[in-house]
Amino acid sequence: MSPLERRARLMLWGMCPAYLVYFVLQIVAPTWLTTLPARLACLAAAAGVHVTVFAIGSLVFGRKDRGPGLTADERDLAIEGHATRIAYSVLLIGMVFVGMIMPFNQGGWQIVNGALLVIVLAETTRNLLVARGYRGGPRLAH
Amino acid sequence: MPIEAMTNDIRLLRFLADDMTQAELGLRVGLTRQTIAAIEQGRYSPSLDVAFRIAHVFGKRIDDVFKWTPAEGEGEAGA
């Protein structure tokens, strides 16, 4: 597995479960989650899980990702570029919705969570496409 | 949408070059083993620079290694 693919999978494993729980909690909105400190703590916990999983994974696999023949080459860059272009479109469309539509009928934490959801969706799209690019994704050219 | 086919003889040329491994070829042209495998299977079309380097490793011309077939109905200039 190439270092870029491993990093993409680590990001997915760290990010998806953490933010899935976060967004489910935001939708269910239990009574203990209505105060500002509780909401901030919940957000910090999701970010913390994400960072921790990624950091531990990087430490465990970091040694494997060094050595001759493991530096990113033009195919890695092509896969990353393709994934980033599509993820950027997701981010752009999402931000138009959050920044230009939501302020007229939503407020406060809904906008914060909307922005966070768009970022998570864009990052998930990017990492999914990177992982797929190595496993029978679309035929790419330099 | 016309589908062009780019094929190559890298697998055969590796075999003829004392069964050179994908990793060894990758090291000599500055690519990973996975990228050489993807090129061989037609899942990735390399840059012209890399195509020249691969041909150079085998002491061949680029069109001895890579073959390109135009899509059906795609005419030549002046044809």
Image: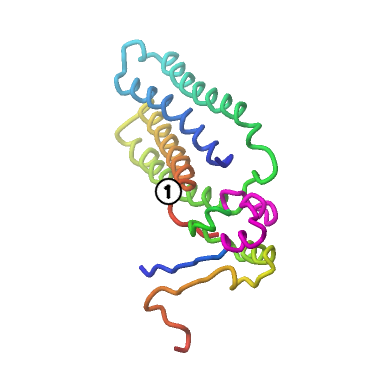
Closer to us: A73 or B56: B56
**How far across and how far down the image is residue B2, in percent?**
38, 70
Q: Is residue A11 above or below residue A2?
A: above
Residue A12 pos. (x, y %):
46, 33
Q: Residue at x 54, y 25 (%)?
A: A51
Q: Quadrant of residue B64?
A: bottom right
What residue occupies the far bottom of the structure in this picture? B78
Circle 1: element type: helix
Residue A78: within the magenta?
Answer: no
Quadrant where the N terminus of chain A lies? top right
Q: Is residue A78 above or below residue A33?
A: below
Q: Which residues are magenta?
A: B10-35
Callout 1 amino acid: Ser
Question: Label 1 belongs to which residue?
Answer: A89
Task: Find residue B40 and report its horizontal and vertical position in percent.
Answer: 53, 58
Q: Residues within 10 Å of mark 1 (few under 14, many from 20)?
A: few
Specify whether A103 is left or right of B34: left
> Looking at the image, which residue is at 39% across and 29% down?
A113
